[in-house]
Amino acid sequence: MSSHESHPPQAGGFRDHLPDLSTPRFTTMRRQDAHEYANAFSESGQPPWLHALYLHWRDLFKEPFRGVTTDGKVRDGLYSVQDEGVPVGQIAEAAGTLLSKLTKEQREKTLYHVDSPEWRSWSNPEFLLSDKGIRLDEFAEDLRNGVLAVLESALSPEGYQKAISAMRVNHFLGELIQAPAVINEFSYNFVLFGEPSASRLWGFSFYGHHLCLNIVLYQSQIFVAPWFTGSEPNFIDDGPHKGTRTLEREELLGLELMQDLSPEQQARAQVYKHMKDPEMPWGRWNHDDQRHLCGAYRDNRIVPYEGILVSEMSEKQQDLILGILHEYLLYLPRKARQMRLDHVKSWFHETYWCWIGGYGNEDPFYYRVQSPVIIVEFDHHSGVFLTNSEPAKFHIHTLLRMPNGGDYGNAIRPMTDPYKQEFTWAG
């Protein structure tokens, strides 16, 4: 019996960890808008660990883009231009309609060159660290709807609903901490890279707290990578969207797979027994990403393989891997998603599954699926706004990368007009 069948997830545990809103952190935050909040962070350098991380991110941004690798060497020939049946012309039309509604000043702030290094300056904290494009909560409903129309036209219906759910959960958090000017359903920035086109490469970035999507389009092909999706809490228990739950399938399928492995497989897959394990080397855990390795600004990270080979798993276990990856590829339109799944499956002989933490029904955990063409990570976090000092199942971070240059569609750019030669991004 799966963990889903035997132990349905608890809905309201997060309410045992609501913060004291009378503390200066929250009384100050509720008086600020997003820009004042970000400026106060930049000027004060508080909290020190986050400010230090931000400075480190900016240093990483200066590095030329290579992509995530296992050993620092990018493997070529892993990606190709292909017909994925994506209606890019319709997406370009939606983007063109949006552009027609922008003022000259808004257009100048929103439209970047297609190979601008600013592709890489997205981030998922609530701090507005990179203020590009238009921020949805600062504009009228008509303009917001124009941005959402672009997003909806690019994503699958279920992928669009996943994004909207993450935005609604973010709004719910803003209500819980009484800081809706900083954290709300529309506290997201939208940036266009390149002129919207049915034939030339272009794309857009949609990013903010707990939802960051980088989408590259070329003819009938789509790349949605890197992306980040999270939630704190992962369940809305009050209000008009009561019952909304995010990232549940990713959690349940991961646990089901780990519990289905043999004891010997579990021992090899479990690279650390504890979520903050004393055996971890320096830097393996940090305050922001915690156990994640491939978050914001980690475009060039070296991530060696860990755990067990998927090709050595049973057919049922491999099906669970595919089920997990299906959830992580949910943003892609159906045909593109299936083609990506088939591509990933062709690399099962070099695909690894690893785990951190316990694997009982109530245990928080981390897992990673990693191959030459995909990395997905799942992590239960300790509290940022809620007060749980240890990782809990109601705070989840997930992300996807396409290693070896696949992020931002970089690997196919030399194959597309006018990209006839390799180019280098630098901050």
Image: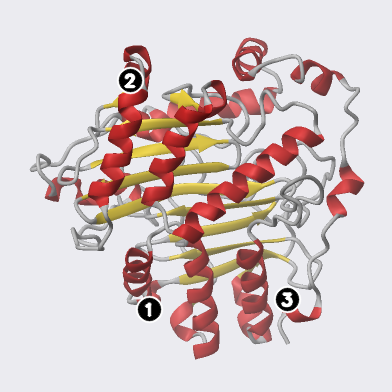
Q: Secondary structure at mark 2?
A: helix
In x, y percent, where is residue 46? 70, 19
- Give whichever of discs 3 and 2 has the lower sequence position: 3
Foreground pick, 310 / 8: 8
* Amino acid bearing label 2: Arg
Q: Secondary structure at mark 3?
A: helix
* Amino acid bearing label 3: His
Q: CA distance from mark 3 to mark 1?
A: 29 Å
Residue at (73, 40) in percent of width and height: 172
Mark 1 surroundings within 10 Å by alpha-carbon count, few (fewer than 14), some (14 through 19), many (20 or more): few
Mark 2 surroundings within 10 Å by alpha-carbon count, few (fewer than 14), some (14 through 19), many (20 or more): some
Between disc 3 and disc 1, the foreground one is 3
Q: Is residue 300 visible?
A: no
**Residues marked 3 and 1 touching at CB (< 8 Å):** no
Between disc 2 and disc 1, the foreground one is 2
Residue under label 3: 4
Q: Examine the rendered structure and indicate whether residue 251 appears above or below residue 220.
A: below
* Amino acid bearing label 1: His
Q: Is residue 152 visible?
A: yes
Check residue 107 in the rendering and tell me which mark sits there, or answer none: 2
Q: What is the tally of numbered marks visible in this picture?
A: 3
Horizontal side, residue 163 vs residue 237: left or right: left
Between disc 3 and disc 2, the foreground one is 2
Horizontal side, residue 218 vs residue 59: left or right: left
Q: Examine the rendered structure and indicate whether residue 56 appears above or below residue 341.
A: above
Identity of the residue furthest to the front in this view: 142
Check residue 349 in the rendering and tell me which mark sits there, or answer none: 1
Residue at (81, 49) in percent of width and height: 390
Q: CA distance from mark 2 to mark 1?
A: 47 Å
Check residue 94 in the rendering and tell me which mark sits there, or answer none: none
Q: Examine the rendered structure and indicate whether residue 48 appears above or below residue 237.
A: above
- Give whichever of discs 2 and 1 has the lower sequence position: 2
